[in-house]
Image (tube, coloured by chain):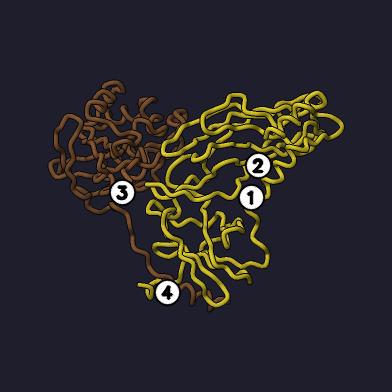
Chain colours: A yellow, B brown
Amino acid sequence: MNRLLASCAALLLLMAGCPRPTPKPTEHSRASLIVEQSSATPGSKVNLGIQFVTDDGWHIYWQNPGDSGEPPRIKWQLPSGVTATALEWPTPMRMTTSAGADYGYQGTTILLSSVQIPATAQPGTIIVGGELRWLVCHDVCLPLSTFLKAPIQIASSTNINEAALRSLKSASERLPKPLPASYQAEAASSKDGFRLTMLTGVPITHAEFYPSEEGQIDNGAAQELAAHADRVSLTLKKSEYLRQVPQHLQGVIILNGTDAYLIDLPIHAMPAQRRSRQR
Amino acid sequence: MKTKLTFALVLLLALPVAAAVQVGQPAPNFTATDSNGHPHSLAENNGKYIVLEWTNQGCPFTKKHYESGNMQKLQKLWTAKGVVWFTVISSAPGQQGYVTAEQENDYLRRMGATPTAALLDPSGDLGHLYGAKTTPHMFIIDPKGQVIYDGAVDDKATSDQSDIAGATNYVTAALEESMAGKPVAVAASRPYGCSVKYSH
């Protein structure tokens, strides 16, 4: 980070828009906005990252915080015609609490987004940013907020900020990937659980599912992995607060502890006669 | 493929339900002492609506509802209609939210909070009996002693006070519906907040 800031300071005379430290340092977790391009052309897309640097022992939350906590939220304030894409979240980790389990991040985390510059944008400097609110927790939680902003020069050529590009690239490698086309996956609902069945063609010794939606599964319950011939299944216990079976099982599955994939599967009901045989 | 999959599905075992209390089931009886040293129990309040509200003064989600006056407003509204409102503190000594009786009475005065009583549960027994997970976490028991609501105070799971205005309050909705003889539309919801600071 120091090297990043130093190289950035050196470049400041030449270009506007380096990764900026948070305007107001806050306790236990600091946020800053990383912008890939210091100058961009009308009609182009500029990649951004909201970087959190959180003290040891503290954590922030994923889009689904689990049984306690709250995800970071940004209210973008963008020039007219500029739009931001939905945040992309790196693969989270599971943390056990007295409430069950939470999902979040420790250390340095970057949430990714991008802004679309309108084709009609006039040359000059625009400011992108927004009001960020997030919760940082240890044994106790602190609500934090700050206003993040960064300038982008609208010009006839693009100027890449190399340090920002590297940060965002390494952040994008921490995003869950689409499920490989050769993998087959199905989700089914029973009275008390969901069952995720996968055919991957590779040995699966460990699997863990993180639901995108709150209140679908019992976050603290063990997820049972079982092998059946050429496929594996993962049994997820339903949340006691689930009111109706969702149409889709959406989230991230981590296979063998390292490979994180996005899944979004329609949920089938288990056939009635099968259900009765389970009892 | 299909056959194998269904075969796999057959192997799924029914999972036991681990909820401490269940909506539609009788609420477990308890006895607890309030911040004025008075004992309270579920049994002695038979025939009344009872609200249980788990709290922790230091939790940002509790602060959202107290610093805005939202929780006090609910307490006033519903105790005026004969509802028994127990605020419960299950923080263990040394943990965030733990208070002595005197500290709790001081807090209630300062915040203008008027629950029927604030139950001190430093052992966490009452919290564990009900499966209280977060602060806040709300339970409602009807005059027949059945749990009619278990979950969040409202549908905006944030620590931001500005979200209260547009939120649907599940406690008010459940009490209004039940008192009108209607089924409670949202009888369970995912409670949101800080984890209850039980002793480890």
Q: CA distance from mark 3 to mark 2?
A: 37 Å
Q: CA distance from mark 4 to mark 1?
A: 37 Å
Cβ–Cβ below 8 Å for labels 1 and 2? yes
What mark, if any, has residue B93 been given in the picture?
none
Q: Place residue A198 in its image quadrant.
A: bottom right
Label 4 sits on residue? A274
What's under tag 2, amino acid-wise?
Answer: Leu
What's under tag 4, amino acid-wise?
Answer: Arg
Cβ–Cβ below 8 Å for labels 4 and 1? no
| SS under mark 1 | loop
Q: CA distance from mark 1 to mark 2?
A: 9 Å
What mark, if any, has residue B131 been given in the picture?
3
Q: CA distance from mark 1 to mark 3?
A: 34 Å
Circle 4 packing at 10 Å, graded few (<14), some (14-19), many (20+), is: some
Circle 2 packing at 10 Å, graded few (<14), some (14-19), many (20+), is: many
| SS under mark 3 | loop
Eye-nearest disc, 4 or 3: 3
Which of the chains bears the disc numbered 4? A
**Sequence-earlier tag: 4 or 1:** 1
What mark, if any, has residue A112 been given in the picture?
2
Q: In this picture, is B43 found above or below A22?
A: below
Q: Nearer the viewer, residue B28 or A92?
A: A92
Residue A138 in the image, given as x and y percentages of width and height: 45, 39
Circle 3 packing at 10 Å, graded few (<14), some (14-19), many (20+), is: some
What's under tag 3, amino acid-wise?
Answer: Gly
**Sequence-earlier tag: 4 or 2:** 2
Q: Residue at x 29, y 22 (%)?
A: B112
Label 1 sits on residue? A175
